[in-house]
Image (spheres, rainbow, N blue to C red):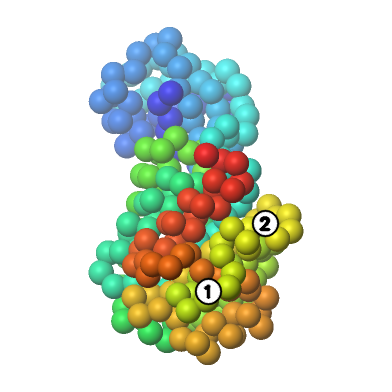
Amino acid sequence: MTRFFMEEQSGDALRLTGENFQHARVLRLKPGERLLVCDGQGEEALCVVKEVTASEMELEVLERRASQTEAAVRVSVYMAFPKADKLEHVIQKATELGAYEIVAFPSARCVSRPDEKSLKKKLERWQKIAASAAEQSGRGRIPKVLVLDSFQKALERAAQADKALLFYENEHAVTLRMALEAGSWSTASLLTGPEGGLEEGEVEQARKAGFQVCTLGSRILRCETAPLCALSALMYAAGEF
């Protein structure tokens, strides 16, 4: 079913205007057809098209409900700043896979470190990528894209989850499967490093913060592959696939 994201939703009638209206016109939606209007926070309204004018589309709300496409587990993806547009790829795919949020942060081996001037524009672009991916994949929530200014702040925030996992290529004893089978959880944080990986001192810092350090297997994954691999495996373990 076609869906649109619209922040302000109240009453029994809604109106599609602006870009949403233009999109609806491209889809040639007509009176009597049904669609979903989502608030981007996990709530949606089942609507029917009542009238189409030259500038807007009037909708009647049939039912309001929690989104039926959101994951039962809340998973946050923490990724150290990568080079080029790799973060954009992770944001798009992590959104499709059901991530609750995507958080970028600096680490010792990060080559790319956006300055304050360029960060505002980058954040706007990254959030648009998340919104587009959420709409395309049929989600009811648009993941927030956040940036933290230090590795320590990333650890402190990520450690608040029921299951805080850090993936390290030099860890060989604890697998992701073992980490997920240890205890119950409804929230999780997945933390990965940049192209050069995390320094040993950073890994020990994460252990002290309460992270479970684990491996993603015997092969070295690219920095843009690792978080998506971990997210996919976690969603499978949670029964989402």
Q: Position of residue 152 (x, y in %)?
A: 56, 82
Element class at badge 1: loop
Q: Nearer the viewer, residue 218 or 118?
A: 218
Mark 1 residue type: His
Residue beneath label 1, please?
A: 172
Name the image quarter holding residue 16: top left
**Residue 153 visible, this angle:** yes
Circle 2 residues within 10 Å: few <14, some 14–19, many ≥20: few
Q: Nearer the viewer, residue 140 or 53?
A: 140
Tally of numbered discs: 2
Name the residue at the bottom extreme.
201
Residue beneath label 2, please?
A: 181
Q: Residue at x 34, y 72 (%)?
A: 82
**Residue 105 visible, this angle:** no
Element class at badge 2: helix
Q: Earlier in the sequence, mark 2 or mark 1?
A: 1
> Would you say the residues marked 2 and 1 are in contact, meaning their CB atoms lie under 8 Å apart?
no
Mark 2 residue type: Glu
Q: Residue at x 53, y 23 (%)?
A: 46
Q: Position of residue 45 (x, y in %)?
A: 55, 28
